[in-house]
Image: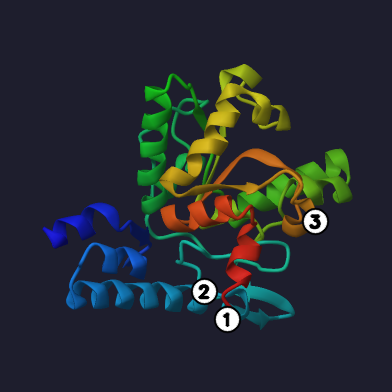
């Protein structure tokens, strides 16, 4: 009976290949769960703490030819921003196309995500459909070369200063990790614009994304912390527990991971 209680109430958190059971000691003692079960939960909690410490920003970076390069490329909490670059040659090894509706037809690399993120996104879209919310995916994985072309085009059209706030330089885009997807709806013509955040679809996405392991990566009022303008359409997979904590504490990914060093 006690084992059933543990399985049903202690949340299971999947972060890449790390699986950790999180339990409060007060809950364990109040339910009379034995020492063996309590020790197992404590061990998993320590493993999770070690996972965060190993992925702390100051432990996952090295300087190569004057650039700060991230070293935990395959981690679901890899931190990529204006100060932390991905190698130009980096391509995730497990890219797949999630079985969800897209705003465009035909094959395209930007339909892809890493498998763990794609599976989670399928669940998110299924929940949206159940709630009568019509979402469509717009853009997922982008190669270094694709991001380079996008940034250069934006710089030509808008000026480099504006482009640097609204698009990433090559090597600094989360889309290259395969863990991000831009999402929109018919209410804004499937465009990627800030007004999406005021639609019922945008509000649903913000409220429900963490349940499936996603965060709104570039939140409103967080521009100085993330380096980018508010993007209510851009979701990033980090795992259910971490997504919930980031949302609950109203943090950026930078702030959350920075607590671990």
* Residue 138 vertical placement versus 175 (above, below): above
Residue 64 image offset from top left, x and y in percent: 66, 81
Instruction: Report the disc number at residue 59.
Output: 1
Indicate the quadrant where residue 195 lies.
Answer: top right
Q: Secondary structure at mark 2?
A: loop
Viewer-closest of 48 and 186: 48
Residue at the outermost left position: 1
Distance between mark 3 and mark 2 Cα atoms: 22 Å
Which sits earlier in the primary sequence, circle 1 or circle 3?
A: 1
Indicate the quadrant where residue 225 lies.
Answer: bottom right
Viewer-closest of 84 and 90: 84
Residue at 51% across, 63% down: 77
Which sits earlier in the primary sequence, circle 3 or circle 2?
A: 2
- Horizontal side, residue 158 vs residue 59: left or right: right
Instruction: Report the disc number at residue 224.
Output: 3
Q: Residues within 10 Å of mark 1 (few under 14, many from 20)?
A: some
Mark 2, residue position: 55
């Amino acid at each position: 009976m006690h084992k059933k209680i543990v399985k049903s109430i202690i949340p299971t958190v999947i972060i890449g290949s790390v699986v950790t059971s999180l339990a409060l000691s007060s809950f364990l003692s109040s339910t009379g769960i034995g020492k063996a079960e309590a020790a197992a939960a404590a061990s998993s909690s320590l493993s999770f703490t070690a996972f965060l410490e190993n992925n702390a920003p100051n432990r996952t970076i090295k300087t190569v030819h004057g650039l700060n390069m991230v070293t935990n490329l395959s981690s679901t909490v890899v931190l990529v921003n204006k100060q932390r670059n991905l190698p130009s040659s980096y391509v995730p090894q497990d890219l797949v196309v999630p079985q969800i509706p897209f705003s465009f037809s035909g094959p395209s690399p930007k339909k892809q995500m890493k498998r763990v993120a794609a599976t989670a996104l399928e669940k998110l879209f299924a929940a949206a459909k159940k709630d009568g919310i019509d979402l469509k995916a717009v853009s997922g994985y982008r190669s270094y070369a694709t991001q380079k072309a996008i940034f250069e085009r934006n710089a030509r059209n808008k000026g480099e200063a504006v482009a640097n706030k609204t698009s990433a330089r090559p090597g600094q885009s989360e889309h290259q990790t395969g863990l991000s997807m831009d999402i929109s709806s018919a209410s804004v013509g499937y465009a990627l614009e800030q007004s999406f955040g005021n639609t019922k679809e945008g509000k649903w996405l913000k409220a429900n994304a963490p349940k499936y392991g996603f965060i709104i990566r570039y939140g409103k009022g967080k521009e100085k912390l993330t380096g980018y303008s508010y993007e209510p359409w851009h979701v990033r997979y980090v795992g259910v527990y971490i997504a919930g904590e980031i949302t609950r504490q109203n943090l950026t990914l930078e702030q959350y991971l920075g607590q671990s060093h």
